[in-house]
Amino acid sequence: MVGIIDEIEEKIEEEEEAIKEIAEKIVGKAKKIKKASSKPKKEKEDNSDADAITPELIKAAEEESIKPDIERKKKELLENVKKLKEKIAAEEITSEELKEKVKGKKKGEMLVPLEEYVKSGIYLGTKVVTPQMKQYVYRRRADGLAIFNTDIIDEKLKEGIEFLSKFDAKDVILVCKRQAGWKTAEMFGKVTGIKVFTKKYPAGVLTNTQLAEFFENELTIVCDSWLDKNALNDTLNVHKTILMVCDTNNFPKDANQTIIGNNKSTRSLGLIFYLLARGYCKAKGIETNIPDIDWWTAEEEKGAEMGV
């Protein structure tokens, strides 16, 4: 908003300078006319109107030229301000509606204390923000990184757990090609019984019935649509459901349900897998030994804080 105000002020200053220049030219011409009228006229010229050029006339003449221009410029500026306000309102309405939705729901405690979200860096996005992810971002850091709203992160994780819990473990796969998530993704699979693909996703495993590894699923958990695009495309081809972890640089249009947050950090992915595993096991009544949160968020790759 500050940038827009600066832009308006700059435009107003430019218009004032232009109007001032016009006024100076008119006054200059009027003075020349007055000076010329004081000189002796040629014998054949009629000098009867010479005395009619008065300061009042000069002022009136100036106003006749300047006033319409000022009114026009003022009208244009007001119209520009109105358009800018409408544009801002249109861009912010989705975000505001989402925030109100979060506030409006009966809000219990967070899945984990706020400090855990902060420590894991789950709130750190990237410098690139796709149009669909803009609604979840509330500001940028000085270095340009987009920052997620932690209240919305928590809300989307709750929705993700509820969504995942509708499926049986045998009908779900999780795909995580990013090395930062390998260790915790495998633990997620161990405690939930969900099939996990790390390192490499076997091409056609969901689509080619001739493959020995063919697997028919109902839900695919995609950790990053850019790295896990093969699994994403296969799932779309067989018309199955997608739960997607989305950073600010992801396009969530193909997802049936999204979880938002940093999907590039060891700690952040670990926290996401921990909360999904804990929530799923609780919902399904699975009795298992889930390592505590410190195990899931213990390691952090170099550069993970920067969202690389």
Image (cartoon, helix red, strand yellow):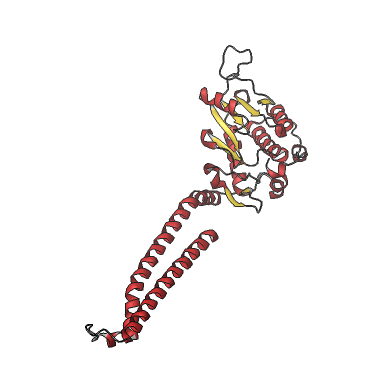
Quarter of the image holding residue 228?
top right
- Name of the residue lying farthest toward the front: 43
Quarter of the image holding residue 229?
top right
Q: Where 193 falls versus 48 (above or below)?
A: above
Task: State how many labels appear.
Answer: 0
Residue 275 percent across, percent down from the top left: 67, 38
- Left or right for 91, reference 173: left
Residue 120 percent across, percent down from the top left: 71, 44
- Left or right for 20, reference 238: left
Q: Residue at x 72, y 27 (%)?
A: 190
Residue 297 percent across, percent down from the top left: 75, 40
Q: Residue at x 57, y 15 (%)?
A: 208
Of residues 87 and 208, the one drawn nearer to the viewer in this rendering? 87
Residue 273 percent across, percent down from the top left: 68, 35
Q: Residue at x 59, y 24 (%)?
A: 171
Of residues 282 and 265, the one drawn nearer to the viewer in this rendering? 265
Of residues 180 and 255, the one drawn nearer to the viewer in this rendering? 180
* Residue 118 can be seen, yes or no: yes
Query: In which quadrant is the C terminus drawn?
Result: top right
Q: Where 110 falls versus 232 (above or below)?
A: below
* Residue 108 can be seen, yes or no: no
Q: Where 212 falls versus 285 (above or below)?
A: above
- Left or right for 73, reference 53: right
